[in-house]
Image: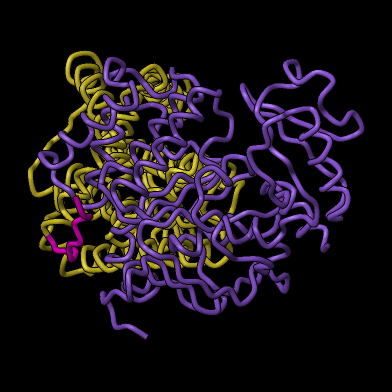
Chain colours: A yellow, B purple
């Protein structure tokens, strides 16, 4: 038997992306216990934060304005942590180098890990959403008006999370103490993306800085304005909010892809990608 | 130089001027080699000599500072996607496979990683796991296996795509005697029966001597010897004689010269002379003749690979 030498194609790329994603999900599933703890922690954390902000009580108006941003924080938190953790673990165990013995470019394997991390984040967010929807609708009387066009700013937010997670994955290839950096970033995202208090109550300079520098803030502010502020997407498009959010997400995606590619090249030059 | 994808005369791996410097420190310098298809090539050297760097440069896992590596005619730098499909690798100090997954899941994953379809991988995975004695435990997590079994899974994962070139960096490290023997038997079979090209690094020189067709000894990033294994051992043949006689020291009691070193197998005894002087040899042969001991052979003493390695590394 001879080795099959095939030229990479889009179909092959998609197949291998699926391979990478299913592998990452299987590995995640093996470690189920931390997932349950993580989900419970995310459930409790929002409650505690909102009690703190509300001076000992849950404020329905504040919950409606911050909940979607908190979900974005959950997805971002898990995706970033998973990307950094997986990259480090695979470096230390040598499977990262094995994954590089693939006919496809390294970022394809990384995209597979990213998709798995996003799935984990979205599933956790779905459980948290289910719990709080019951609480909001039947206990706290919080008004959440869901409209399907909200998927547009939410998708932009997901793209931004994906780009930023890729960026963090690239940094993890270079900086061993990435865990500390990720935790600081996660704290910044939570405080400034509107998950605790809405961005519009920030001082103007801080709101602008948050929208430029903190991933998910732009998309979450647009989602809040659409879902609870009664603004239309058309208006947000014409006032520049959505184009800017799109551009921002595209820039973060490009930054993430470039950072990952650069880090891989640097790792190969330095022989630092293995155990 | 051959074009992309073209193969030289049975050459599986071509290295030309391969050099690696890390922040001014030269790990590998001006390495040029051709390794033929079906050859077991042992790369030997002390720790830090550059063996792993060479293996990783061949695999495209370390970018050379200068030089090129071609696998099956494909340059690893410019035709990476084709070149890596020629390789299976077991890397030193690594798990190489996912301990959270089962042996079966690992083989399916690594097969797909190289672009194979599941339907192509399954029969190969089944054959590999059966031959390595892992079939009954294929659904168990690799993390629950013994070190030897984990290494077997790593070898199987490297072989699941049926690569033409196998890079084995310390493949038997940490293995028990039986697992090590299994890996050694596999190396011989893959090279001699299936025509695979195998690049092997190891500190177990006895194993290298047993398996390799050709040996390169590397010191401080430079190759100081590169010869077919037999030629290398012949080159360092010692200037003294060994006389092989029938019988064991017990059965020959009183008939053997008492002042000479001798070793024995089940039915033969080898007497080692301290010099190559003809007079000494004749004297010993006369003594044996007088005692009616059957002489089977007289030869120059050939050192083992370990002795040659030590002499070369110590600069003798």
Q: Is residue B207 left or right of residue A239?
A: right
Viewer-closest of A107 and B310: B310
Bounds of the magenta span?
A1-10
Assign the magenta stretch its main secondary structure. Answer: loop
Query: Which residue is located at x 43 percent, y 72 percent?
Result: B14
Q: In the image as oriented, which residue stretches furthest toward the left?
A: A148
Give the total number of marks visible in the rendering.
0
Q: Is residue B216 left or right of residue A122?
A: right
Query: Which residue is located at x 33 percent, y 76 percent?
Result: B8
Coordinates of residue B20 in the picture (x, y in percent) = 61, 71
Q: In the image as oriented, which residue stretches furthest toward the bottom?
A: B1
Magenta segment: does it hold A8?
yes
The quadrant of the image that shows the C terminus of chain A is top right
Coordinates of residue A131 in the picture (x, y in percent) = 25, 19
Viewer-closest of A269 and B21: B21
Would you say residue B197 is visible in this rendering? Answer: yes
Q: Is B95 situated above or below A13?
A: above
Coordinates of residue B291 in the picture (x, y in percent) = 79, 27
Magenta segment: does it hold A36?
no
């Amino acid at each position: 038997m001879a080795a099959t030498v095939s030229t990479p194609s889009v179909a092959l790329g998609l197949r291998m992306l699926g391979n990478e994603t299913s592998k990452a999900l299987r590995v995640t599933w093996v470690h189920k216990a931390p997932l349950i703890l993580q989900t419970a922690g995310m459930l409790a954390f929002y409650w505690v934060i909102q009690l703190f902000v509300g001076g000992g009580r849950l404020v329905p108006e504040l919950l409606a304005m911050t909940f979607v941003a908190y979900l974005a924080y959950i997805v971002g938190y898990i995706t970033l942590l998973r990307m950094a953790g997986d990259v480090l673990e695979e470096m230390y165990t040598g499977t990262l180098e094995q994954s590089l013995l693939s006919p496809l470019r390294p970022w394809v394997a990384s995209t597979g890990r990213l998709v798995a991390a996003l799935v984990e984040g979205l599933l956790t967010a779905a459980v948290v959403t289910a719990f709080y929807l019951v609480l909001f609708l039947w206990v706290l009387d919080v008004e959440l008006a869901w409209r399907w066009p909200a998927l547009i700013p939410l998708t932009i937010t997901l793209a931004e999370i994906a780009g930023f997670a890729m960026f963090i994955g690239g940094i993890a290839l270079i900086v061993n103490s990435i865990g500390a950096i990720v935790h600081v970033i996660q704290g910044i995202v939570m405080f400034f993306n509107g998950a605790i208090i809405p961005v519009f109550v920030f001082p103007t300079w801080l709101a602008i800085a948050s929208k430029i520098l903190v991933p998910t803030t732009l998309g979450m502010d647009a989602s809040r304005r659409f879902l609870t502020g009664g603004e239309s997407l058309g208006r947000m498009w014409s006032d520049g909010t959505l184009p800017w959010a799109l551009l921002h997400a595209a820039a973060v995606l490009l930054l993430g892809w470039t950072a990952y590619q650069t880090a891989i090249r640097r790792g190969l030059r330095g022989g630092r990608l293995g155990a | 130089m051959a074009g992309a994808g073209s193969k030289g005369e049975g050459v599986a791996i071509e290295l030309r001027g391969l050099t690696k410097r890390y922040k001014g420190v030269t790990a590998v310098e001006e390495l040029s080699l051709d390794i033929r298809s079906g050859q077991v090539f042992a790369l030997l050297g002390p720790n830090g000599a550059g063996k792993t760097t060479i293996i990783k440069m061949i695999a495209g896992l370390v970018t050379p500072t200068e030089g090129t590596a071609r696998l099956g005619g494909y340059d690893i730098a410019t035709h990476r996607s084709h070149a890596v499909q020629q390789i299976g690798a077991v890397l030193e100090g690594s798990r190489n496979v996912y301990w959270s997954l089962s042996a079966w899941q690992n083989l399916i994953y690594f097969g797909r990683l190289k672009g194979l379809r599941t339907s192509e991988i399954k029969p190969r995975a089944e054959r590999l796991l059966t031959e390595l004695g892992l079939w009954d435990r294929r659904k168990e997590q690799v993390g629950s296996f013994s070190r030897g079994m984990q290494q077997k899974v790593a070898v199987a994962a490297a072989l699941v795509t049926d690569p033409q070139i196998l890079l084995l960096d310390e493949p038997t490290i940490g293995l028990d005697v039986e697992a090590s023997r299994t890996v050694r038997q596999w190396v011989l079979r893959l090279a001699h029966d299936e025509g695979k090209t195998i690049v092997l690094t190891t500190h177990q020189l006895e194993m290298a001597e047993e398996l390799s067709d050709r040996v390169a000894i590397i010191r401080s990033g430079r190759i100081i010897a590169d010869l077919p294994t037999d030629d290398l051992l012949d080159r360092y043949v010692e200037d003294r004689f060994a006389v092989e006689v029938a019988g064991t020291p017990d059965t020959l009691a009183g008939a053997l010269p008492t002042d000479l070193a001798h070793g024995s197998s089940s039915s033969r005894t080898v007497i080692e002379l301290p010099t190559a002087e003809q007079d000494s040899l004749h004297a010993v042969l006369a003594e044996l003749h007088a005692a009616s001991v059957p002489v089977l052979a007289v030869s120059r003493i050939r050192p083992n690979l370990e002795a040659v390695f030590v002499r070369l590394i110590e600069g003798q």
